[in-house]
Amino acid sequence: HPHPHPHPHPHPDPNPYRTLTPKPRQEETGCSLEVRKPPANMMIIAGPSDAVGRASETILELFETQRRIEMVIRFDSEQKGLLFGKGGSTIQRIQQESRANLDIGRGTDCVVRISGPRANVNKARSALADILHLDAACTRTVLVPFDIGEVVAARDKLRRLEQTHGVNVIRMERKDEAPTFGVKVRGDEEGVAAAVAKLNECVERERRVEEVLQVETQHVGMLLGKQGSTINAIQRETGALLDMCRKADEGCSTQPVTVRGNRASVDRALAALEEVLQYKAECHETMSIEPAMMPLLIGKNGEEINRLRALSGAAIDAGRASERPVFKLRGSKEAVVSAQQAIREATEANRKVGDSEVLPWECIDVLVGPDGDGIRALESEHSVTLELPGHNLASDMPCSGTFLAIATSIGVRGRKKHVDAAIAAIRALAERNALESIQLSEDDSRLLASLCLENGTLLQELGERVAVQ
């Protein structure tokens, strides 16, 4: 019975019967087979009805598996390296295992042409599908800003995404200086959704943002710190970049500080700036300061007021209220109270006072030194004036007289904190030069005298051994 075979594929083999060998098939099916070549292009099967039916099915199945076809598969340009493998090893392995021919497009032509018997082509296509995830249930693309690409889409991070969620992740190429590039995720719907959510979270976390904080001009120095130490520390610790105008606009009482970085670093920097400036502090107080004390409480290059700020944790600004100098305090209630106490203590420490210290007579010459040099050095070091009874050693006149015949009380005048430090230094000098006498018996005196006659340097050696005179 004649049974012409249709041509379901757009590229049929011009002679689909050439793979048939009639004699073995006749023995297998129990039918006679006659192949008529072109232009007839048909096979005649003769035999019992049921045998002819079975033979027809066998031959049709053979046609389907042995018919030569061509299949075209497209892939992303970023997958070309994955497709080739090292030295072309991947594509060669697929060809050897499938026995199909694979031809990969050149340049920007991202296609694979597979040709050969249908069974071989299908096997090659299956291998390619595993590598290129052609049959993924879900494919989504996440756009990543180019300026954070190396943070969000670094190779190691994408590999971790693949391992964690069981998906395929490909970083697409940036096109024509575009501000973003794509990251394509393939896999099952659940895995792709989780991977995309993670990528979007990372993009939002690392996305570059910019915030501007207006800083009062009088607080710029406090924000900068000594030689920029404060603002540099904030940048180093938060990872944000802080940009401040060098000079405020004319007539403007504030200067903008621009904070740049990812969202997390900018938030950390703004919190650090608030910790220094304390514009949102819960407690604000004003404290009157004696006019003569204000320069002393500010100190040289702001050293004293910076010390008070660091000690209390409060923001302290110098200002005027009703023509009187004041300190404006900001911070927590505890910090403001601590600042008030520290300012009062600093005020008292800077008041001019007079005090005295009794110095043993044997220490006077050590304190005074040759031509009064020692006492002048102590005055210079502690910013005080020292006086011996009857002599003012602040002048260039050296002290004269016999110290055994005068009182040994040393007068100290100056600011309280300096006076306290000078008296502490005088006491330390007295301790280092203390004199203690030992009353020897007559026998011990004779013994010591005879020893000294024998060794004229005995007393000197003893003094050096125990660090006394």
Image (cartoon, rainbow, N blue to C red):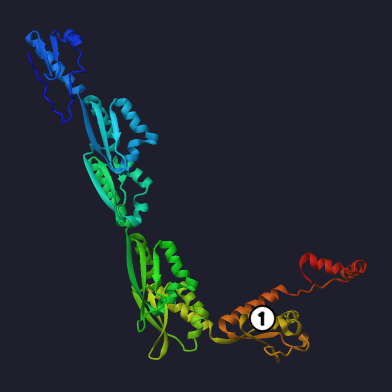
Report the side of 108 relative to 311 (left or right): left
Q: Which residue lies furthest to the front in this view?
A: 39
Residue 281 in view: no
Vertical arrangement, residue 211 with respect to residue 292, above or below: above
* Residue 80 placement (x, y as % from top left): 32, 40
Vertical arrangement, residue 244 with respect to residue 90, above or below: below
Vertical arrangement, residue 440 with respect to residue 100, above or below: below
The type of residue carrying mark 1 is: Leu
Q: Name the residue under label 1.
A: 378
- Residue lying at 84% horizontally and 69% vertically, measured from the top left: 459
The one of 286 and 34 positioned closer to us in this rendering: 34
* Residue 183 placement (x, y as % from top left): 29, 48
Image-quadrant location for residue 14:
top left
Instruction: Report the label total.
Output: 1
Residue 451 in view: yes
Q: Residues within 10 Å of mark 1 (few under 14, many from 20)?
A: some
Report the side of 225 relative to 94 (left or right): right
* Residue 319 placement (x, y as % from top left): 41, 84
The C terminus, quarter of image: bottom right
Vertical arrangement, residue 113 with respect to residue 3, above or below: below
* Residue 317 placement (x, y as % from top left): 41, 80
The one of 23 and 397 positioned closer to us in this rendering: 23
Image-quadrant location for residue 163:
top left
Report the side of 349 relative to 394 (left or right): left
User: Quick one: SS at disc 1?
Assistant: helix
